[in-house]
Amino acid sequence: MITSVLVANRGEIACRVFRTCRDLGIRTVAVHSDTDANALHTRMADVSVRLPGETPADTYLRGDLVVKAALAAGADAVHPGYGFLSENAGFARAVEDAGLVWIGPPPAAIEAMASKTRAKQLMGIEPLTDVTEADLPVLVKAAAGGGGRGMRVVRHLADLEADLAAARAEAASAFGDGEVFVEPYVENGRHVEVQILADTHGTVRPLGTRDCSLQRRHQKVIEEAPAPGLPAGLDEEVRALAVRAARAVDYVGAGTVEFLVADGHAHFLEMNTRLQVEHPVTEAVFGIDLVAEQIRVAEGHPLGTDPAPARGHAVEARLYAEDPARDWSPQTGTLHRLSVPGPVRLDTGYTDGDEIGVHYDPMLAKIVAHAPTRAEAVRTLASALERAEIHGPATNRDLLVRSLRHPEFTAARMDTGFYDRHLPDLTEPHPDPHAPLAAALADAHGRSRFGGWRNVPSRPQTKRYLMAGEEHEARYRHTRNGLEADGVRVVHADARLVILEVDGVERKYEVTHYGEQVYVNTTALTALPRFPDPTTDHAPGSLLAPMPGTVVRVADGLTTGVPVKAGDPLLWLEAMKMQHKITAPVTGTLTSLPVTPGQQVEPGALLAVVTETS
């Protein structure tokens, strides 16, 4: 019987496994990088072991260090979570060779299925080798791992080599394996998957379907169970194919078989030999704990009786520290506050005050709603996200709310091209026009006691804020009757709460300050100084780092003085396990290139200058 489990992972999934272990009376062990010394998963475990270093390559991808940590801490089992080494057969073998229990499928099954090239061959599908114009568009894909890393859609043959190189580098950084392959790209299909659970006694159980069609950069954003609107025949087909794939490799434990559904046909994508990020929606509709089932299977117990039929509908949204309007650029900084009202499930690896760094995936949390019907679950989730307090780096919260309420999604007519079609509309800023005034009134609370209203009563006070990228000025007055503003009635104002009557309706504004950063309900503002300090303007054509990261590559032959065309790739910046291509903004001459590969840069750092051809 397992008594102590080390989770070979970090963040949300480590915390999630620890919760189940505690429910089962199992001692928990965390591993952590130097960056994660005070992370939630480190604090949550009974004991923790340091992995010296900061980057994944030096820490969480070092299987030898993780095994040593398990032995040193007295663990008798290892759970891999997802990502990192979760689909690494060599690591699974090393765990077993050390006399530890591996809470996952047999290494041979991982070997057969974790490499997507071998998995497709096993299912009778061959990857493309010599790509021609007739094959386009194609998808470059990492053979190991998942989560959208190492993936590129290629629509022009001239881009193939560069995208192959970028995908290899990204896959090597995220999974320690740079193997990639090429396959046909199916446009605008639905991403449907089947959760399976298998034991060592020959039972393979398909646990319903999920739909994960809403994706950005091939990484899932919103998932749900069961997959809505599948014809009965197709539903049965994907379940049967999932069982067939599991039996082909003598699978054991929890896994997921993924398909792309288009024109009424299911195209096999891959089998993920691990727990999926979206597993909570299956847990919700079947009323089971998949981590507990993984542990029991690892202990040799047979699966019990078939679970009750799926009940109701569950929807999950992934909350990311990223800016969808700026090419999904990841964001860093202090997460001052994260609070999501119920009735929803919140899975996260962060608490108030934690730092969001550059080394790991930008997912902050998963929020899951379960209800008797799909419409009710979607409504509950959208409302919880809309009312959540998320103070810190920019997130995709508004995008999630608008996606859940979009007619295509509510009617279950979504596909993998959803964001390609709708991103501009979904990211159009719609800030509350009265948020700056509420912030200014909260800031001014109590100043009238010093007699400010007597000095120049005819002249309004002003305060400027940056909101949604634009400058806004709030104007108000101190009077004998309190604070007043044009066009609205100030019902109440103190440092935390402002109530304004607008067109006969009283609206409440909760105001929170973190230095110059101000949150009015869910609207973020930055207080601007009354007399701004002069700043150095950058030359026209300057390319500034959109995020902190590392310059990993400069385009071949790129030096100052060479001509470039608008859209030409100049360099690649790696942040949060993804590579971001920086392109020339105009056609002209590269007149400055102050960075080199391996150099770390901060947001706003000058990367290059392209002087436009007149």
Image: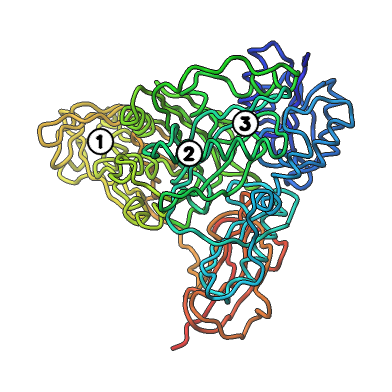
Write down the quadrant of residue 101 in the picture: top right
Contact, mark 1 vs mark 2 (Cβ under 8 Å): no
Q: Position of residue 168 (x, y in %)?
A: 69, 60
Secondary structure of the residue carrying tag 3 is: helix
Q: Residues within 10 Å of mark 2 (few under 14, many from 20)?
A: many
Check residue 13 in the rendering and tell me which mark sits there, or answer none: 3
Give the farthest residue toward the right.
Answer: 98
* In the image, residue 178 above or below residue 355: below
Q: Nearer the viewer, mark 1 or mark 2?
A: 2
Q: Position of residue 93 (x, y in %)?
A: 84, 36
Q: CA distance from mark 3 to mark 2?
A: 14 Å
Secondary structure of the residue carrying tag 1 is: helix
Residue at 38%, 45% in the rendered image = 399
Residue at 31%, 46% in the rendered image = 408
The amino acid type of the residue labelled 3 equals Ile
Check residue 68 in the rendering and tell me which mark sits there, or answer none: none
> Residue beneath label 1, please?
452
The amino acid type of the residue labelled 2 equals Leu
Q: Quadrant of the N terminus?
A: top right
Q: Position of residue 453 (x, y in %)?
A: 21, 35
Q: Residues within 10 Å of mark 3 (few under 14, many from 20)?
A: many
The amino acid type of the residue labelled 1 equals Gly
Q: Which tag, 1 or 2, sits closer to the chain's start?
A: 2
Q: Describe residue 499's horizontal placement relative to residue 88 as left or right.
A: left
